[in-house]
Amino acid sequence: MPAMSYFAVFDTLTYLTVAGQVLSIVIGLAVVLSLMGNRLGLRMRSLVSKHALILMFVVALVATSGSLFFSEIALFAPCKDCWFQRIFMYPQVILLAVALWRKDRTIAWYILALCIVGGALSLDHYSDQWEAILNPIEHDPLAPCDLSGVSCSATYIFELGYITIPLMAATAFLLNALGSITVVLSTNAKKK
């Protein structure tokens, strides 16, 4: 794959991350407003909930594909922290595909659990990278974090002055967590 194609994929994933962050803010506001009884918030939450399974599936599929692109095509060796994040993202593709096929919205609880743990791991990894960026003498970005020889503090990409691979993952986890929350709240509202 030519180097220019790599940069096109990096840029695409970067802009999808920014779009995901903006969408997270909108969905988060809709959830908060809906909890306060705001009609617009309730309508927005209902709209997201109605399409949440397919949206979460697409997010998980893009995140998994991006992760595999970085390791298998761009040849960025995943560190220990990246492997743990993969453990919590990769199964979501299969779980959400089955849930879509069966029209099973109860999957939201399981996706939410995976996202909470995976998102926490992503944010911890992202903070490790920032520590290495801001204080490279104390937090050597080249020091391996395990016997694989790969550093968890290394930053393979740094786009728009803040976007790294762990932040891309954290954004995907946040989007799927918010999607799960909309499903859970809508399901609970229908039970009342």
Image (spheres, rainbow, N blue to C red):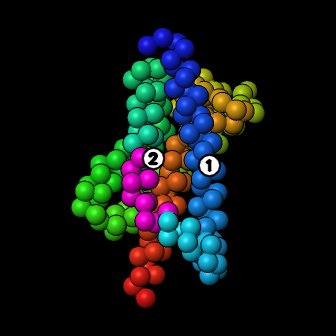
- Outermost top residue: 2
Q: From the viewer's side, name the closer residue of 25 and 148.
A: 25
Q: Main secondary structure of the magenta part?
A: helix
Task: Please tell me whether mark 2 sits on a helix, a strand or a loop.
Answer: helix
First in sequence: mark 1 vs mark 2: 1
Can the viewer see residue 69? yes
Badge 1 element: helix
How far across and how far down the image is residue 47, in percent? 50, 65
Q: Which residues are magenta?
A: 48-58
31, 159: nearer the viewer = 31
Asked whether 53 falls inside the magenta stretch, the response is yes
**In the rendered image, the vertical position of residue 157 relative to residue 92, given as above or below:** above
Image coordinates of residue 83 in percent, x first then y, are: 42, 38
Residue drawn at x 62%, y 81% as measured from the top left: 37
Residue 45: x and y in percent read 53, 68
- What is the three-letter code of the residue carrying label 1? Gln
CA distance separating discs 1 and 2: 12 Å
Give the labeled residue for mark 2: 59
Image x and y of residue 38, in percent: 64, 78
Crowdedness near tag 1: few (<14), some (14–19) or many (≥20) residues, C-alpha within 10 Å: some
Identify the image quadrant of the C terminus: bottom left
In screen coordinates, is 75 left or right of 20?
A: left
Q: Is residue 159 above or below residue 170?
A: above
Give the answer, above or below, for where 34 lies relative to 151: below
According to the image, label 1 marks what residue?
21
**Residue at point 39%, 42% (across, down):** 61
The quarter of the picture where residue 35 lies is: bottom right
Identify the residue at image location x=43%, y=65%: 50
- Tell me the kind of residue under disc 2: Val
Residue contact between numbered discs 1 and 2, judged by CB atoms under 8 Å: no
